[in-house]
């Protein structure tokens, strides 16, 4: 027969449940602490990664600016102004284009034709076969590979006039007998209110503020493509003013009243925007042109300067303002860059002249 437990044994047995409860409590606390630790560590990691991403983005932009090839960062230099042609002073020039050694300037009431150096040659007086030029004011000018001169007009006509190399009126563009796209209806091929003209890659690009689109025509006048429509969303326009086409067919559109430049692929599909610095956004972009280095020049009319971007859309610099000399622009509009010579021609509207810059 077993004896009764002694006092020591009874004390140990009494303490055993207490020890078990304490161990259980400690294990629960360790479990809670472990979960809290993991959550805290996860939050710290997320915040750290976000901070590193922001720092990397800032540092990479700064690095890119400091390590651009020198030629991309070199600003053009001012050369000389062109202020007169054979018929007198040039007033309110809106667009310029160089072709066949001649400079064509869309100004009040005429298209002035000079040499690249500004020596007057002749002027194209706007008129159709009736010789009626009432209310005709040229907005833009372009030349195709056949030497035909295309002139968009505002005021009462809102049409595109086509002239021969001799300055004689040929026809209105597009011809009314030209088939359009899709249904072939007159609406599908109609130019409502043309502004900008750009002949590139065998096609004529027309910005039409009548229906807020960019229309792409063949040389024969066939409507190949229509981009956009009225609005503020991507691929929509509010007063599209000018276009430029890169060598790979990419299309750039100065969406003036939306204060942006939109980029499309050669089929007219929206790709992206050109983005200037946050501290100096676009106000009213109008003229567009590519130089020999593949840089895109954007004329901002309200800011009276030209923004320049690298071929991969990185902002580089501006020029045309802040010098307090004759190189300062005032409400500039159109731009053309002669890639053979590197000369840059800008329609300096309020200064009533075309200014010429040299690409270094």
Image: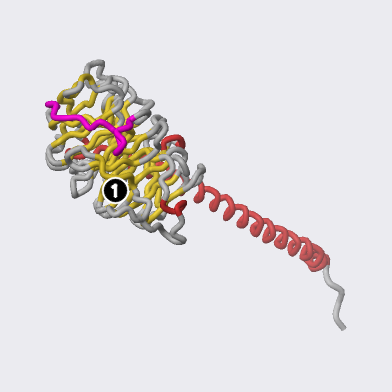
- Find residue 161 and report its image quarter: top left
Query: Where the N terminus falls, by quadrant?
Result: bottom right
Question: Considering depth in this image, is 188 or 101 the residue closer to the camera?
Answer: 188
- 132 is within the stretch colored magenta: yes
Q: Residue at x 31, y 30 (%)?
A: 94
Q: Is residue 275 visible?
A: no
Q: Say whether residue 294 is left or right of residue 118.
A: right
Question: Considering depth in this image, is 210 or 17 the residue closer to the camera?
Answer: 210
The magenta-colored residue range is 118-133
Q: Position of residue 206 (x, y in %)?
A: 35, 45
- 182 is within the stretch colored magenta: no
Question: Considering depth in this image, is 258 or 63 the residue closer to the camera?
Answer: 258
Q: Position of residue 306 (x, y in %)?
A: 30, 31
Q: Residue at x 15, y 32 (%)?
A: 358
Q: With respect to residue 337, does 44 lie above or below?
A: below
Colouring method of the image? secondary structure
């Amino acid at each position: 027969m077993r004896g009764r437990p002694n006092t020591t044994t009874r004390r140990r047995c009494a303490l055993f449940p207490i020890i078990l409860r304490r161990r259980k409590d400690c294990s629960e606390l360790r479990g809670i602490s472990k979960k809290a630790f993991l959550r805290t560590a996860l939050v710290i990691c997320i915040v750290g990664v976000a901070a590193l991403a922001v720092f990397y983005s800032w540092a990479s932009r700064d690095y890119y600016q400091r390590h651009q090839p020198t030629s991309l960062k070199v600003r053009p230099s001012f050369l000389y102004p062109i202020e007169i042609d054979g018929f007198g002073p040039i007033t309110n020039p809106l667009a310029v284009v160089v072709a066949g050694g001649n400079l064509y300037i869309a100004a009040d009431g005429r298209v002035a034709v000079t040499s690249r150096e500004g020596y007057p040659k002749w002027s194209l007086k706007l008129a159709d076969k009736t010789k009626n030029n009432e209310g005709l004011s040229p907005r833009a000018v372009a030349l195709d590979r056949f030497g035909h001169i295309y002139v968009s007009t505002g005021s009462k006509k809102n049409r595109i006039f086509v002239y021969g190399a001799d300055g004689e009126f040929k026809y209105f563009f597009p011809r009314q007998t030209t088939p359009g796209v899709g249904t072939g209806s007159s609406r599908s091929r109609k130019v409502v209110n043309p502004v900008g003209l750009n002949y590139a890659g065998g096609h004529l690009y027309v910005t039409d503020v009548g229906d807020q689109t960019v229309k792409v025509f063949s040389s024969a006048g066939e409507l190949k493509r229509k981009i956009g429509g009225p609005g503020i969303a991507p691929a929509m326009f509010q007063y599209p003013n000018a276009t430029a086409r890169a060598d790979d067919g990419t299309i750039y559109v100065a969406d003036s009243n939306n204060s942006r430049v939109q980029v499309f692929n050669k089929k007219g599909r929206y790709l992206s925007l050109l983005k200037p610095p946050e501290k100096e956004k676009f106000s009213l972009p109008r003229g567009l042109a590519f130089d020999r280095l593949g840089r895109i020049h954007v004329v901002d009319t309200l800011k009276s300067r030209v923004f320049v971007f690298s071929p991969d859309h990185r902002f580089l610099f501006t020029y045309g303002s802040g010098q307090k000399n004759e190189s300062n622009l005032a409400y500039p509009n159109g731009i053309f860059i002669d890639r053979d010579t590197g000369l840059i021609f800008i329609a300096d509207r309020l200064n009533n002249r075309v200014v010429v810059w040299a690409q270094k």
